[in-house]
Amino acid sequence: MADPPVSEPIDIVLVEDNPGDVRLIEEAFADAATAETAFRVFTDGTSAVEFFDDLADSPEATFPDLLLLDLNLPRMDGFEVLEELRADPDLATLPVLVLTSSAAEEDVRDCYRRSANAYLTKPDSPDEFDRLVNAVERFWFKTARLPPTPASS
């Protein structure tokens, strides 16, 4: 039996400096086709943190449903981004999925210590990206109950 479609557009912030990976991720979500997905893409950690700081300061802001975060970023790495977000009470419950090429146990441990919700290693092929995105979408948008956004809580 097919999963029911997600009723609302999915709003994802993607922090990724590799244009090829950005394209693969966006295409994989488009191929999943269970819901419209809007991406806000940032290519460095500092820009992403500034974006979230602006969101937290704006009462009419629309918070994203999910953050996909690479670790190896210019200006501010993913570990620092995670620390900054988790230190802000308005952003502490935002689901953050680390999506990185590193499979190092130390990186996995450090991300979970900083309260990442999941640690995913980037796949090697477009088909594997599709499978990963289908699993993310199925779990995070069909199975799990997302926390209320600060604007609605």
Image: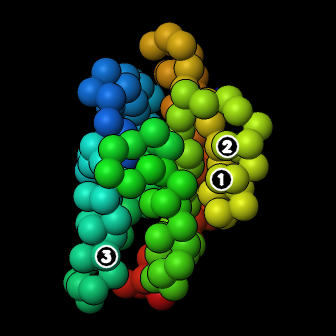
Kindly indicate whether the residue at mark 1 contacts the one at mark 3 (C-beta within 8 angstroms).
no
Query: The disc labelled 1 sits on which kind of residue?
Result: Cys
Q: Position of residue 1 (x, y in %)?
A: 66, 30
Mark 2: amino acid: Asp
Q: Which colour scheme appears in the figure?
A: rainbow
Which numbered marker is on residue 111?
1
Gap in Å between the C-alphas at discs 1 and 2?
6 Å
Crowd around label 3: few <14 · some 14–19 · many ≥20 (10 Å): some
Residue at (60, 30) in percent of width and height = 102
Point out the tag, 2 or 3, that comes first from the N-terminus: 3
Q: Is residue 51 visible?
A: yes
Q: Nearer the viewer, residue 20 or 80?
A: 80
In the rendered structure, the answer to whether residue 93 lies left or right of residue 14 reads right
Of residue 94 and residue 121, the one placed in the foreground of this image is 121
Determine the CA span between mark 2 and mark 3.
25 Å
Which of the 4 quarters of the picture holds residue 35? top left
Q: Which mark is residue 53?
A: 3
User: Mark 2 falls on what kind of element?
Assistant: helix
Q: Identify residue for label 2.
A: 107
Horizontal side of 8 relative to 72 (left or right) equals: left
Q: Position of residue 38 (x, y in %)?
A: 28, 47
- In the image, residue 120 sits, relative to residue 14, either above or below, namely above
